[in-house]
Image: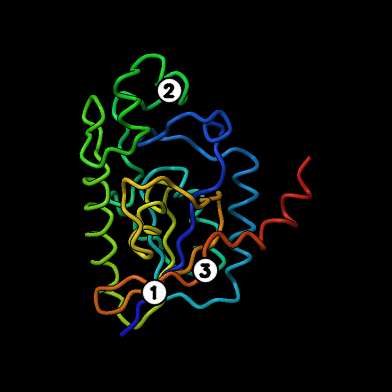
Amino acid sequence: MITRFCFVRHGETDWNVQRRLQGHIDTPLNQTGLAQAEATAKGLQGHAFDALYSSDLIRTLQTARYAAQLLDLPIHLRADLRERHYGAFQGLTYSEAERHFPADYARFKAREAAYEILDEGESLLQHRQRVQICLEDIAVKHAGESVLIVTHGGVLDIVYRMATGLDVSAPRDFGIPNAALNWINFRQGEWQLLQWADQAHLHAALDELP
């Protein structure tokens, strides 16, 4: 049986704009992000979902609440849907992290799969294992159903790689826009990419912003 997933990255935050590493730090949506979350919920109204899951961080929960209201679904919170833990880099911009921790940042930028970021940060392999275990658990629970998941860019990076076979250490050659729709199937332990980074629902909403 196939489990059909729609993955949504949370709406924009001020730290996204500043290119600041959020990780597990709880940062809210900005006004653009709230508009994106509302537009995403409206864009999903034509689809039927059996369940809605979200990371427990506020930026994902704010995004998920719009969809929960319009789709009339409860939100199931999962801490294992959180962003990768960026350790000592959390709260810093990419340039600040490079300046303060040049050697460690070089390993981070090179996507060394087993490198654990300073101060209890996750390696790419640890992050992938956490995400894969979580999503396979959800897929089995909802076999034959459709599931909406609101999560983070780092989680979606892992999802794309699971569905395409791209290694975690390979450079990212795909976008992960805020509030885009990403459709994936799961069947008999295999992930299949259907559609990625659909933003058609966002254009009208964003055009109305000052």
Badge 1 marks a residue whose secondary structure is strand
127 relative to 88, above or below:
below
Quadrant assignment, res 141: bottom left
Question: For the point 49% across and 63% down, which residue is it?
Answer: 182
Question: For the point 46% across and 67% down, which residue is it?
Answer: 6
Q: How far across and how far down the image is residue 103, in percent? A: 30, 20
Which quarter of the figure is the C terminus placed in? Answer: top right
Identify the mark nearer the N-term, 3 or 1: 1
CA gap between label 1 and label 2 equals 35 Å
**Amino acid under disc 1:** Asn
Q: Which residue is mark 1?
A: 185
Tell me if mark 3 has few (under 14), some (14-19) or many (20+) residues whose alpha carbon lies within 10 angstroms of its own.
few
Q: Which residue is mark 3?
A: 195
Identify the mark nearer the N-term, 1 or 2: 2
Identify the mark nearer the N-term, 3 or 2: 2
**Amino acid under disc 3:** Gln
How many numbered discs? Answer: 3
Tell me if mark 1 has few (under 14), some (14-19) or many (20+) residues whose alpha carbon lies within 10 angstroms of its own.
some
**Amino acid under disc 2:** Leu
Question: For the point 37% across and 14% down, which residue is it?
Answer: 100
Q: Which residue is mark 2?
A: 92
Tell me if mark 2 has few (under 14), some (14-19) or many (20+) residues whose alpha carbon lies within 10 angstroms of its own.
some
49 relative to 100, above or below:
below
118 relative to 58, above or below:
above
CA gap between label 3 and label 2 equals 32 Å
